[in-house]
Image: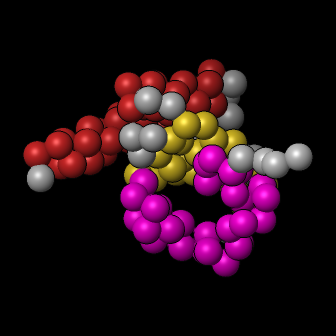
Amino acid sequence: MVLKLNTIADKIRANKIKPEDLKNLRRFARRNDMCISSIPLKDGTAAKILSNDKEYDCLIMKNGKVLTARGAKDNPVNIMGMVDNIITHLIKRDRVVDPKQAHLDSLKAINDYIDKFEKEMFD
């Protein structure tokens, strides 16, 4: 059986991305041409959301270690909706430390995505 490793999350779960590669997640995101959002959760973990126009990945991390990772590839129109759905789901389930800040982070993620998309379109 051959597994397709389509997303960053798939590669993390298959140990194709080493934990030390994720020590500086901002640098990792930049190298992979992705935007990053970080949402602190009440249980001491954080939801790290990496996204670009082709995929999104949600990593639940604690002390620099990935506890769970999920991701998907889709078309550019759907990606930001999926990212917003993740953040909205975390807020509705009362898992977020600061819901107001999480909403702002969601808006910032969408804004970063649009800025990145416009830069690619007009450069």
Q: Residue at x 51, y 41 (%)?
A: 55
Depth check, front residue: 46 or 97: 46
- Specify whether 12 is left or right of 50: right
Q: Is residue 16 within the magenta segment?
A: yes
- Residue 71: image location, x then y, percent: 63, 41
Tell which residue pokes out farthest to the bottom in this image.
20
User: Residue 114, located in which quarter of the rendered image?
Assistant: top left
- Residue 81: image location, x then y, percent: 45, 25
Q: Is residue 40 within the magenta segment?
A: no
The answer to whether any part of residue 109 appears in the image is yes
- Up-down relation of residue 85 to residue 7 (above or below): above
User: Residue 105, located in which quarter of the rendered image?
Assistant: top left
- Specify whether 10 is left or right of 80: right
Residue span colored magenta: 5-34
User: Residue 109, located in which quarter of the rendered image?
Assistant: top left
Number of numbered labels in the structure image: 0
Q: Residue at x 71, y 59 (%)?
A: 12
